[in-house]
Image (cartoon, grey):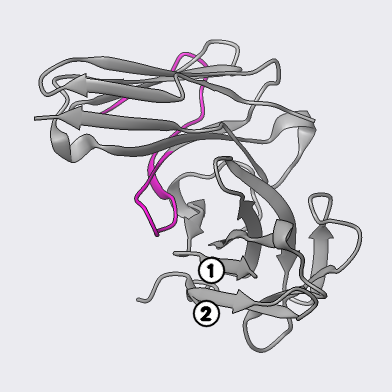
Amino acid sequence: NAGVMQNPRHLVRRRGQEARLRCSPMKGHSHVYWYRQLPEEGLKFMVYLQKENIIDESGMPKERFSAEFPKEGPSILRIQQVVRGDSAAYFCASSPTGGVLLSGANVLTFGAGSRLTVL
Amino acid sequence: TQLLEQSPQFLSIQEGENLTVYCNSSSVFSSLQWYRQEPGEGPVLLVTVVTGGEVKKLKRLTFQFGDARKDSSLHITAAQPGDTGLYLCAGAGAGGTSYGKLTFGQGTILTVHP
């Protein structure tokens, strides 16, 4: 029973390139959250998706960032024209339902993260 | 913006000492989680508290949720070097959000010296 799988674990990009981060949720989980952890800062919410729907993208920068969770395949966080300030660890988390009580059968499980370095 | 203030940011203690980490907010949360994060890894859930005033124990760790569900504490008894790590509190449901969108504290880096 694999956990939340994120890849790549490490990604190096030059300024102006695109970064694509993938997240495969736990089996049976249809709710995905993306968080960003900047150096020396806590985790910040970016976006919440269900299959084929973006539910809450209030934490996403208005430009260059997009996310999707297609019917088939992993969730993708895409960053276009990366800048040095995008260097961070990006974490994906999944849960079986979208409920707010993250306990019991609705535990939120985090992946190991994708660490993006922009040169 | 809902904020979760976590303190202290750094804690360096000797093996065998006790410690407490605090998380405080002006917002009410539906549930509050405590995580531990190792370098290069994602947060791993330690406990979830849901009811105001709730106390949960996990071996030497005691977690408490404030009566008003705005604050929480993590107390470690007789700390061991294996407790060293980053501890994060996170609240869900602030502002009436009905899904598991988390607001994280800044984290506490705990170092336990043998």
Q: Secondary structure at mark 1?
A: strand
Q: Secondary structure at mark 2?
A: loop
Disc on res. A114 = 1
Q: Chain of mark 1?
A: A
Q: Residue A21, position in %: x, y?
A: 63, 76
Q: Residue A15, position in %: x, y?
A: 75, 73
Count neighbours of disc 1 (C-alpha within 10 A) and say few if under 14, some if 14 to 19, many if 20 or more.
Answer: many
Residue closest to the eye, B69 or A118: A118
Q: Residue B89, position in %: x, y?
A: 49, 33
Q: Which residue sits at x=46%, y=13%?
A: B53
Tell me which amino acid carries mark 2.
Pro
Quarter of the image for the N terminus of chain A: give it.
bottom left
Q: Earlier in the sequence, mark 2 or mark 1?
A: 2
Tell me which amino acid carries mark 1.
Ser
Residue furthest bottom as drawn: A72
Q: Is-magenta flag for residue B55?
A: yes
Q: Which residues are magenta?
A: B35-58
Q: Are marks 2 and 1 in contact (CB under 8 Å)?
A: yes
Q: Which residue sits at x=73%, y=43%?
A: B98
Q: Chain of mark 2?
A: A
Q: Which residue sits at x=72%, y=76%?
A: A69
Give the side of residue B54 with respect to residue B100, left or right: left
Quarter of the image for the C terminus of chain A: give it.
bottom right
Residue designated by label 2 = A8
Residue closest to the eye, A107 or B84: B84
From this viewpoint, is residue A22 visible?
no
Instruction: Using the rendered image, report if marks 2 and 1 lie on a common chain.
Output: yes
